[in-house]
Image (tube, rainbow, N blue to C red):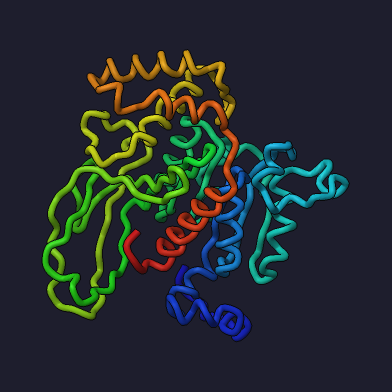
Amino acid sequence: MDGEELTEQETALYDRQIRVWGVDAQRRLSKAHILVSGMKGTVVEFCKNIVLAGVGSLTLVDSREVTEEALSANFLIPPDENVYSGKTLAELCCDSLKDFNPMVRVSVEKGDISSFGGDFYDRFDVVVISSCSFATKKLINEKCRKVSKRIAFYTVDCRDSCGEIYVDLQNYTYSKHLRPGSSGKGFGWVYGRKFTYLLEHYCIGDVLKGLPGKSWGYGKELDFPKKLDETDECQLQYPSFEEAVTIPWRALPKKVTKLYLAMRVIERFEEAEGRNPGEISIADLPGVLKLKKELCEAQSFNESHVPDALLERLVSDTSEFPPVCAILGGILGQEVIKAISGKGDP
């Protein structure tokens, strides 16, 4: 992402945001290549944000056709049925996104994302996937980790007014501006293996009842440099997707939300039944509750931490809630920009 300077046209167009995060961050953003799969409401919000921010290129993958559910949350689909008839979701979203910022190269890649090889993923700096199975998330994360360069990997899912974001930045170095009052001891949360310098974590950005928040893993005190008003370089080492989601529930801190556990139960149920994400209804609730009981017993985990009422809510309505899509898409866009620019705490 290093190399060419911004053109005069780019500098003029992105003047306001350059004043916020600087020329170097905008230059990195304008040279970044992002791959997105699964054009649902949350992902559409993210694409809109990242295109307006001035990313270098955006490649879309989604061969599904337009459905009534897609129309309820995807504002990039034209209202005229004659326009979207015969086109895939990726093609329709591509046409609309080009109008948001003509300076961003938006294209469509046809095919099954799980079938693409490592050389394909090596073309991108960021990979964002949604609306796919646990096995597919795991497979793509493994492929991203095997290429020679570091690829920022994200998954995002939204059900009704609940959602989550998974982040894997691998070995990530970033700069942090130390403000007055930020010296001395800090407190971080750690998931998985030993941390390198600052912390290692699996962060779940979740939204429950429309309120954004974060859940983290084990805690440990960290030493911060004591000089104020200067930039410090920090390093994070992230666990893989498989490592993060297979941590025993009993080992998770109390701060982890019930939503995280409920989403894992439903994910396991859909995988066991051979369902696509979201192919679940209230009729499946008895099976979901039975699986929850089995998972809790296998891990000697208190069932009350995975409320039946929450599971019922998640299986009753799997459609996305547009206001929550906007919140999640905004959070994801901000995190991706920070990962590309290397500025600010991820």
Q: Residue 160 in the image: state x and y as whole percent.
A: 54, 38
Quarter of the image where one finds residue 294: top left
Q: Is residue 122 visible?
A: no
Q: Residue 209 in the image: state x and y as whole percent.
A: 45, 43
Q: Residue at x 67, y 48 (%)?
A: 74
Q: Quadrant of the C terminus?
A: bottom left
The answer to whether 256 appears left or right of 339 in the picture is left
Q: How many marks?
A: 0
Q: Residue 297 in the image: state x and y as whole percent.
A: 28, 15
Q: Residue at x 53, y 68 (%)?
A: 31
Q: Residue at x 26, y 60 (%)?
A: 235
Comparing 165 with 121, the one in front is 165
Q: Residue 312 in the image: state x and y as whole percent.
A: 48, 25
The answer to whether 240 appears left or right of 186 in the picture is right
Quarter of the image where one finds residue 298: top left
Q: Is residue 198 visible?
A: yes
The answer to whether 243 appears left or right of 6 in the picture is left
Position above or below: 153 against 177: above
Q: Residue at x 40, y 30 (%)?
A: 262
The answer to whether 249 appears left or right of 125 in the picture is left
Position above or below: 223 against 108: below
